[in-house]
Image: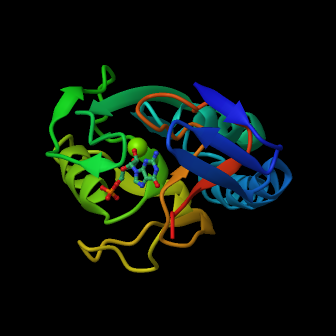
Amino acid sequence: MAQVMSSEIIGIGPHRFKMLISRETIQEHLLQVADRLREDYRDKRPVLVGVLNGCFIYMADLIRALNIPCEVDFIKLSSYRDGMSSGDLSLTKDVDMDLTGRHVILVEDIVDTGKSLGFLRQHMQDKNPASVVMTAMFMKHCFTAVGSPVEYVGMEIPDEFVIGYGLDYAQQWRQLPDLYALVEDK
Ligand code: 5GP
Ligand code: MG
């Protein structure tokens, strides 16, 4: 059961999370990404492919800020993390749309090691799109493990476990409007 100690700190079971980035700051950075994407995709009717589950809040905010003709589809990877540990990658839901000749924008909540990104980019390329780029609201490293760039990054954040703004802890807490980071016990 969660215990709200203040809006800055929440207690979840044995863990404490501290507010890292406010909703206002997230929106400021999101608008900058939307401006760049609008400039680059205005006449391309892109397909935004969201990576479930974490993308849904970023996707909803992004397409409204973007406000250009576009289509939306979703893809799902196997539960990569349960709680805070990582596991193997596999696809549990593919896109429904034919992406041949389309301009694809992959929409991720956060990039950490870049493993998911590398996997998804290859998977998308196999569908013969006109182009594939990736946007992530948060990014933990400037250069990812697979050496693949993320073209449209909302914000770089410290290498900490975070929740809120779509990101979960054991499938919960995605609804938090701000981003919170785990406070390590000393
Ligand atoms: P990567 O493959 O880049 O290491 O990890 C990407 C995926 O792991 C993200 O799409 C996200 O679902 C999950 N992930 C990475 N870092 C975090 C984090 O700090 N918190 C949460 N809740 N999920 C994360
Ligand atoms: Mg994700």
Residue drawn at the location 25% of the way across and 45% of the way down: 124
Q: Position of residue 67 (x, y in %)?
A: 75, 37
Residue drawn at the location 62% of the way across and 30% of the way down: 2
Q: How is the image coloured?
A: rainbow
In the picture provided, is 75 more to the left or to the right than 39?
Answer: left
Q: Is residue 159 above or below residue 37?
A: below
Quarter of the image holding residue 114? bottom left
Residue drawn at the location 38% of the way across and 80% of the way down: 143
Q: Residue furthest top?
A: 96
Quarter of the image holding residue 76? top left
| Quadrant of picture, ligand 2 | top left
Q: Is residue 13 above or below residue 139?
A: above
Q: Is residue 98 visible?
A: yes
Q: Position of residue 98 (x, y in %)?
A: 29, 26
Q: Position of residue 75 (x, y in %)?
A: 33, 31
Q: Position of residue 152 (x, y in %)?
A: 55, 63
Q: Nearer the viewer, residue 17 or 121?
A: 17
| Quadrant of the drawing holding the N terminus | top right
Q: Is residue 165 visible?
A: no
In the picture provided, is 148 more to the left or to the right than 169?
Answer: left
Q: Nearer the viewer, residue 174 or 124?
A: 174
How many discs appear? 0
Residue drawn at the location 68% of the way across and 61% of the way down: 36
In the picture provided, is 127 more to the left or to the right than 155?
Answer: left
Q: Is residue 126 above or below residue 78?
A: below
